[in-house]
Amino acid sequence: MSRMKLDYPQLLETNNLLQINGDETYWLCVTRTVQESKLFPVPAYMLLSYAMAFYRYPSLLAKIERHMKAEEIGDRMRNMGIRCQAVAMWGLPCFYLLGREWMINMGVIRPQDAAEDVAYVLDFWKRFQLSWRRNHGHLTAAQAGHRAQILPERQLQVFHADLYDCAEGDELHEAAHTFVASASQYAFLIACESRISLHNHGPYNLGEKDGKKRELLVRDFMDLAECDLPWLDGVAADVPYNNLTVTMAVQDCHFNILDDWGSFESEPEFRSHHLCGVGLYTSDSLTDGYVPVGMGSAEELTATFRELNDRVKEATANLWKRFAGYSRDQMLDAGAMTYYGIIKDLAHVAGCYDPDDWMKVDERAERFRPLLNDEYSRDMLGTICVGAGPSHQFSEYTMMQHSDLPQKIYSPISCQQILRDGDYVPSVGDISAGVTYLDPKQDRYQTSAGVIGYEEYNRRARENTPPTCTEEFRFMDETWVKYNHDSEAVERLYKLQQNGSRNLQDKGAGLRRDDVEKLRKP
């Protein structure tokens, strides 16, 4: 199956994208603690997920693009408030490339094999990234100085205007802080003791108030209810929202790093007393954007946080009980599907999601299960993530970014091998059958339209084009708005974004940040 035309410019670009991702992979991995758990076989399920990604991502991305191009999906996800998480940050290319690197080090493939797949996956990622990150023009958070400022002004104005002020000791502050803590713990367990189900982006500058500098951090919680993940069937039946976004205004605390894993560092360390404003929203591929949740008043929002906190705590207890009964193979499947399925929302947006594509282990990856004991998995994961394998070694004159070692994390594709020798295998081919030790996924998906089956979910997603994503508005980037802010088209665009805002309804374009601050109501 032909994925890409492999001419010289394409190979040069592919190797450049390999290098960009390799540099960031090393930095992310060496600045983190060990990736292990007392419950889940984390290194083992990560390796299995990488093999699944290597064998399936090329075909699944091609299937998605038969319905919607990568760059259009990026535009939609930015405008609709749909999770982008490590899809856009790191997971899409790097889970695939880590699987490739593992195969190279085992001698299963050569660096030139699956060359068309590699070029296509990275080209898809590049187009998606540049679209989703259009407002700051970088491929990665690393290129932006480890910042992730994704949203346009018109959405940030709504978040800013509708924040409810809070302070340590008051009811809203306590309710919000308690919910965020409980939801973070729940999301961590949902994702098999990983951070796949929660994400942060920003920071966004809210200016000063009462002499204190303020920033906005946006935290997304994903896959909270009955959704794609089979282990949440029944367990999360009482969780009413699959995705929740908490907007958090913070004072006297600067977020100096928001990286490609969605984690952050701040000066000083972010503590609860820094939280000075909060909002709550939901969104999915059926909404027109972020939908306010419990935002009618501060009292309503407080009650909503408390109710949601009770529900996620109950779901957490239920999920612990379910996982306690899982075998090692079931835990291995669940973790691998969590990691590998990190890009599944691309299929939801395109309206072509099939649980067999995402919730089963490809039979070619399944062959490696007998290798995945704790010791081998731990050592091999470390090898491929920090460049300790034979495939990673290069000339002694080489000095890798961050370490100065003679290594590359991801093996480049040889131009000679492709363009002159012709000695390569272009692709791994189409998707093979899948297997799983888990119970079959029930056809129940909690969405903004209620609980529906996946075919109905696909149909509604295909039929849904939010007004801000139509051809009239799709290409109105921040530069165009800057020079055409007084046009009728921009006025209509801003008013569309302001639908549902309690403080900016029909205010239109032309507002500055100070104007938005003055329009805020208790």
Image (cartoon, rainbow, N blue to C red):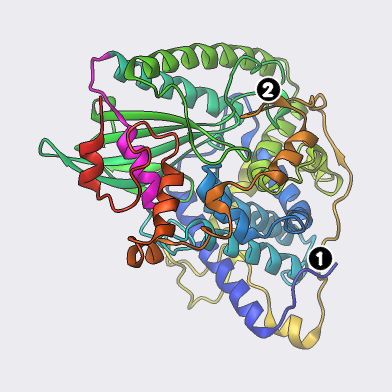
In the image, farthest residue toward the front: 488
Q: Amino acid at mark 1?
A: Ser
Mark 2, other Cα within 10 Å: few <14 / some 14–19 / many ≥20: many
Residue 444 falls left or right of residue 434:
left
In this rendering, is residue 1 above or below 45?
below
Label annotation for residue 460: none
Residue drawn at the location 40% of the way across and 58% of the way down: 488
Label annotation for residue 232: 2
In the image, farthest residue toward the right: 433
Residue drawn at the location 76% of the way across and 53% of the way down: 60
**Which residue matches tag 1?**
427
Q: Amino acid at mark 2?
A: Leu
Q: Which residue is at the front of the view, 349 or 484?
A: 484
Camera sees residue 268 = no
Magenta range is: 148-170
Quadrant the N terminus occupies: bottom right
Mark 1, other Cα within 10 Å: few <14 / some 14–19 / many ≥20: some
| Residue 39 image position (x, y, % from top left) | 61, 24
| Residue 155 image position (x, y, % from top left) | 40, 45
Q: Earlier in the sequence, mark 2 or mark 1?
A: 2
| Residue 21 image position (x, y, % from top left) | 54, 61
In the picture, residue 450 is in which quadrant?
top right
* Mark pair 2, 1: CA separation: 35 Å
Residue drawn at the location 81% of the way across and 24% of the way down: 439
Label 2, secondary structure: give it.
Answer: helix
